[in-house]
Image: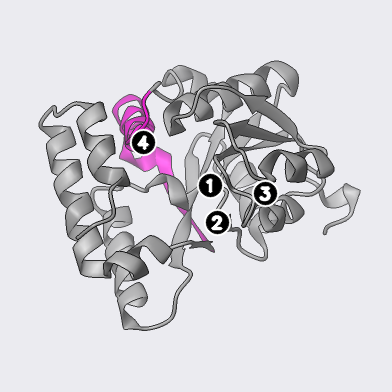
Amino acid sequence: MESRADIIENLCVVIPTLKAGASLDRLLTQCAGYPVIIADGGSTDNTINQAVRADAVVASGTAGRGTQLRRGVDWALKTQNPEWILIIHADCTLPEDWQGDVREHINSHPTKAAYFTFGAKASGWRPRFMEFVVKLRDIWPRLPYGDQGLLISKDMYQSVGGYPDQALFEDVEIIRAIKNTFGKSALRRLSGRIMTDVSAYERDGFATRTWRNVMIMRDYNRGVSIEDLIKRYRKPAS
């Protein structure tokens, strides 16, 4: 952990959780020294206990990723009044020097939002190919997903209206709002690699689950209801 003098001022971390006890402790340790808002959706494991032990603030309420993130960031803005918010999924591991990446971005690119380079927590060529595909998506159409984190200023977040109150593709919508409002150049990929849990891809097969997600995204863009899509998203790929 860095000394208090090295802590980035005016930064608050928001973590959406739902039964995240298996991975949350590690992330909370990485975020030690910063105000952390846990936007919980009704965990029944030890998620809340871990958050309390780490002196994080727990904002509990209705489940749903977009709903939780909106609640968590709103709570952060009201109680911490940060200039910058870092949103991280509970099953991710931040890069070793994530604070250096964030500090450099805030100092050198204050008008842009940022996200980390994607890394898959798995060995073999399939996860490496997945990382390559995500990097292509980062370049064009510049569409990072929530498991890459999001570093965004309070001003930009409020300008785009924040996260939508929906259970799926909330990450896609806020990125689209940023691009529509400020242009594609307002998004910047950080060099640090965030490691993401891909156990669901290992379980279902990388190709099978990736294709299933592509089809869900296609149907989302065609206007299929979130309720129908979330059922397909939560069902193991076959």
Disc ID at residue 92 = 2
Going 75% across and 46% down the picture, which residue do you hit? 50
**Residue numbers of the magenta segment:** 166-193
Quadrant that contains the N terminus: bottom right
Give the alpha-carbon distance from disc 1 to disc 3, as whole Å.
20 Å
Residue 112 placement (x, y as % from top left): 48, 38
Label count reads: 4
Residues at badges 1 and 3 in contact (C-beta under 8 Å)? no
The amino acid sitting under disc 2 is: Cys
The mark closer to the camera, 1 or 3, is: 1
Image color mode: one colour
Disc ID at residue 103 = 3
The amino acid sitting under disc 3 is: Arg
Q: Which of pointers 2 and 3 lies earlier in the amino acid sequence?
A: 2
Residue 39 placement (x, y as % from top left): 60, 31
The amino acid sitting under disc 1 is: His
